[in-house]
Amino acid sequence: MTHVASGAAAARAGVDKVEIMDSWLAPRLPRLPGSGAELRLHDTAADARRLVVPSPGEPATMYVCGITPYDATHLGHAATMMAFDLIYRVWADAGHEVRYVQNVTDIDDPLLERAERDAEDWVVLAMRETALFREDMEKLRLLPPQHYVGVVESIPQIASQIERLLDMGAAYRLDDGAGDVYFDIASSEHFGYESGYDRDLMLRLSAERGGDPERAGKRDQLDPLLWRGARPGEPAWPASLGPGRPGWHIECAVIALELLGDQVDVQGGGNDLIFPHHECSAAHAEVLTGARPFARAYVHAGMIGLRGEKMSKSRGNLVFVSRLRGDQRGEKVDPMAIRLALLAGHYRADREWTDDVLKVGQQRLALWRDAMGLGAGPDGAALTAALRERLADDLDTPGALAAVDGWVADALAGKGEDPGAPRLVADAVDALLGVDVLL
Ligand code: 5CA
Ligand code: ZN
């Protein structure tokens, strides 16, 4: 089944619909008494914390860079997605409607390379891993985006926006006959503002993260690819640009513009996307629309590491959510314990996954369940206020967990006689942290 959405940008581009793949089932989201605090988030572009509140009368909007589906879902993906899930929860608790879009990079070099290595059809590989990701998100109780969008289904829109960039003189063709089109970073006066990185660092990261600074014939070494002309043996789509497939950054820029408008409140992903991905997406979007900044806050989650190195598909040092929650050594890990384990660190911190981190999550979940199953406890409203206050402060989950730990310890020590408190605290923990202790 697919949903159909239309957008002003789609209409402008002469395309009347965007096909959207299925998201996943939404968990229960309890409404809490009163209303939550407005959210402050660290914005990478400003390198400062700022209030991130939607324009009056408008929904809060968020675009999050999703998986490249060839090895899903490792704990790094889960941790990053969870940070944006908390933003959604804090906004909803503050009374805002939220519009959330996430993409799937279902065509890309690493996906094709993996399919080739395993002698598998890349479409089958992408569909299988995307299905697994959805199931993991559901089990971890992440709120689903309203639009979960594949790149493959968005190619006509992406191609037509690349044509607009060519028409505007912001893009150019390389004249070596390959049919490749590049973005001219000089067409954006502000290129570099999102990361704030110096040119040497940009050049190094561009080479490491899918760019091609050494390619001959480009106007600037940092110019990113917009359209890769068809190559023998590679998938390609027909377009008036010539057959080919899109470059990475333009995909996310166009999907976001189509479904969320010219500007978004939050553009998100892990901090490995600060440059070149989010810098280039912002530059593409801003040149296409003339609206600046593309995102009011660029929000980046830290990297989850294993044995001292970033957990990554290319390194292969992965812990999969599906394996943890499945039968492992005869033991199924409760997804809520995985959730608590990941929330114990601050979302912006690069941090290690260890057996101990998981054990602490499991112990915490057991204690919370005991306390929230009691007939009475200390003041639940005070705890709800403390949770709201901690999360609104750049998603201070260590502080939020400590506040709940304090309430739990008191409740288990028989302090507090409020019979409604355990239920209220369970609802607050569910609504704000996504942890269902009653499961
Ligand atoms: N498809 C692109 C984004 S358009 C991509 O980066 N895919 S990914 O599969 O490599 O990563 C998916 C999301 O998880 C991204 O937001 C990425 O920044 C984040 N991520 C990847 N590895 C880690 C990690 N070790 N720790 C935390 N987040 C991670
Ligand atoms: Zn992206």
Image (cartoon, rainbow, N blue to C red):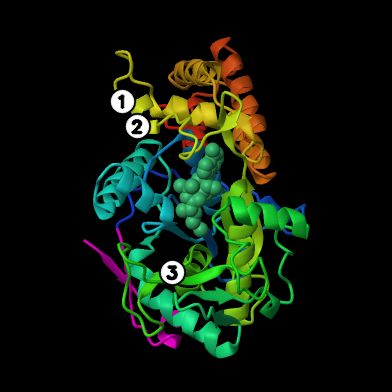
- For mark 3, what is the residue? 246
User: Circles 3 and 1: CB distance less than 8 Å?
Assistant: no
Q: Sequence-wise, which precedes: disc 3 or disc 2?
A: 3
Q: Is residue 2 magenta?
A: yes
Q: Quadrant of the N terminus?
A: bottom left
SS at circle 1: loop
Residue 152 % position (x, y): 34, 65
Q: Which residue is mark 2?
A: 322
Q: Which residue is mark 1?
A: 326
Q: Are marks 3 and 2 in contact (CB under 8 Å)?
A: no
Q: What residue lies at 49% left-to-right and 62% top-to-bottom?
A: 248
Quadrant where the C terminus is found in the figure: top left
Find the magenta span and give its range. 1-21
* Amino acid type of the residue that numbered disc 1 sits on in the rendered structure: Gly
Q: Amino acid at mark 2?
A: Ser
Q: What secondary structure is marked by label 2?
A: helix
Front residue (pair 12, 336): 12
Residue 168 shown in magenta: no
- Tell me whether circle 1 and circle 2 mark residues in contact (CB < 8 Å): yes
Give the left or right position of residue 121, taking residue 382 as reference: left
Q: Relative to the observer, which residue lies in front, 293 or 337?
A: 293
Q: Position of residue 225 (x, y in %)?
A: 53, 69
**Residue at the spot x=29%, y=20% of the render?**
327
Question: Mark 3 and mark 2: span between their CA atoms?
Answer: 31 Å
Q: Earlier in the sequence, mark 3 or mark 1?
A: 3
Task: In the displayed orientation, state which residue is furthest to the top.
Answer: 413
Query: Residue at left 62%, top 68%?
Result: 282
Check the image and report above or below for 152 versus 87: below
The answer to whether mark 2 is within 8 Å of ligand 1 is no
Counting from the top left corner in percent of width and height, residue 208 is at 60, 50
Badge 2 crowding class, 10 Å Cα cut-off, few under 14, some 14 to 19, many 20 or more, is: many
Q: Amino acid at mark 3?
A: Pro
